[in-house]
Every structure is written in structure tokens, then in C-alpha cells.
Image (cartoon, grey):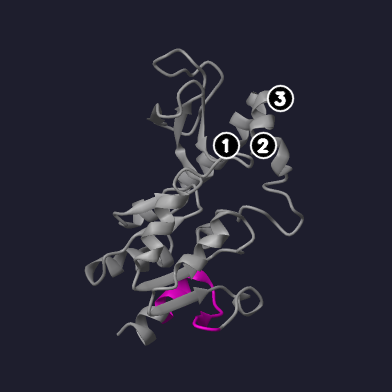
Amino acid sequence: MSAESGIPTFRGSDGLWENHRIEDVATPEAWKKDPELVLEFYNQRRKRILEAQPNEGHFQIAKWQSDFDVTVVTQNIDDLHERAGSKQVLHLHGEIRKARSTFNPQLVYEIEDWSLNIGDKCEKGSQLRPHIVWFGEEVPMLQVAAEIIEESDLFVVVGTSLQVYPAAGLIHHAHGASDKFFVDPAAHDLISKSGWTVVSKGAAEGLQEIDRVMLR
């Protein structure tokens, strides 16, 4: 979804994320082994996201709020949906512009600029970590997302490889939606077309086509 805003996708074709092994920067074990590396990795991602701007796909979703009750369920950790104007955004994998206590995960704080460092502590005195769901951790908002999708009348999937679980399994909760759209250049290889309208285009172009051709 955010690739067209210049933010690299989570996992490249070489299996790396920004030239790092996932195991080295996005797991609880990585945090225990080298917290400075993890913090610096997310600092650089945060800085890049702050420099990025929402693309036309983000803005198209926000525009639908004038006609529909829209909830965005995203695996992305950036805030581009919010900056485009979307009011109801559920982040499955956390939010990069927030930090949370390593003592109490309920203590969550906004990060004012782009850096989070060793020595930055919560009100209880424990080190702050990125407010991100790492591999090996539970996805706390998963059930909430499933309930939202089960109640949906119209369901749009965009910009996902459907390879990251358990989030990928959420598509199976859309059985009640009368219209289901899948937007991805390679969508024909990723999902059965039974019951789905497949739009084999990028996020911005595909969402605008849905709006122009199918929802008007």
C-alpha cells in the first residue's frame, strides 16, 4: 500500500528487509541480543516514513468515508492512512511512530521526532522499545480485525502478498461481504477468483478503478 509512497515493502525478493535479516531486527530475540541495532533499524525506517507522503491510494480510501463506514485494517506500521485523512485505522502490526514500555506493554507513547534510543524510558523506568509486533509475538488486534471483517458488506484487499500469517488468514472472515475486491499486480497468482473481483494493478491505480468503474 505504501510502496508507491517510496516506502519499501516488508520483505524483498531476497528475503531481506532493508538489507537486514528479519531475525536480526524484528524478533524478541533480536531485541535481547542487540537492542541498539534494533532501535537504529527502526529509527531509519521512522525517518524515512516521516519524509514520505500519502499516495493516491491512501487518499482514495479516505474519500470513501463520505459514502461508506470505512475501517482500514493494515499490516503497515506507517501513519500514511491517517495523514491521508482516514479516521478508523486498525494497525495489526503496530505503529512505528509510537514506543512502548518493556515493563508494561499498555504504556504507549508518541515519538516526537524520528529517534528512539537506549536510555529512553517509560514512566516506570523501563527502556522503551518500538511499538511493533515482532515475529514470535501475539497479534493483539487480530480478533478485533476479524470481527470487523465479518461484519463488512464490501471488502477490499490491497497491497499484500498474503504470505504473512496470521494476518493473511483474515480474508477468510469476509464470507458475508457481497462484494470482494483484490488489488495487486500479481493477484491472479495469489487468490482464487471465486467470489472475488481481481484488479491486477498497483494500489493507487487499482483503487481508483474500483471507485470509478465498480462503485459509481
Q: Nearer the viewer, residue 197 or 114?
A: 197
Q: CA distance from mark 3 to mark 1?
A: 16 Å
Say what amino acid the circle numbered 2 marks. Answer: Val
Asked whether 96 or 108 is in front, the reply is 108
Which residue was labeled with disc 2? 25
In the image as oriented, which residue stretches furthest toward the right?
Answer: 14
Report how far apart the C-alphas of labels 3 and 2 lie in the structure: 10 Å
Cα separation between marks 1 and 2? 8 Å
* Residue 117 to residue 203: above or below: above
Q: Rate crowding at label 2 as few (under 14), some (14 to 19) or many (20 or more) other CA atoms within 10 Å.
A: many
Disc 1 marks a residue whose amino acid type is: Tyr
Quadrant where the C terminus is found in the figure: bottom left
Query: Residue drawn 64% across and 28% down?
Result: 31
**First to last magenta residue range:** 194-209
Residue assigned mark 3: 33
Q: Nearer the viewer, residue 55 or 207?
A: 207
Nearer the camera: disc 1 or disc 2: 2
Amino acid at pointer 3: Lys
Secondary structure beneath dot 1 equals helix
Q: Percent x, y for residue 148?
A: 37, 59
The circle drawn on residue 42 is: 1
Residue 211 is one of the magenta-drawn residues: no
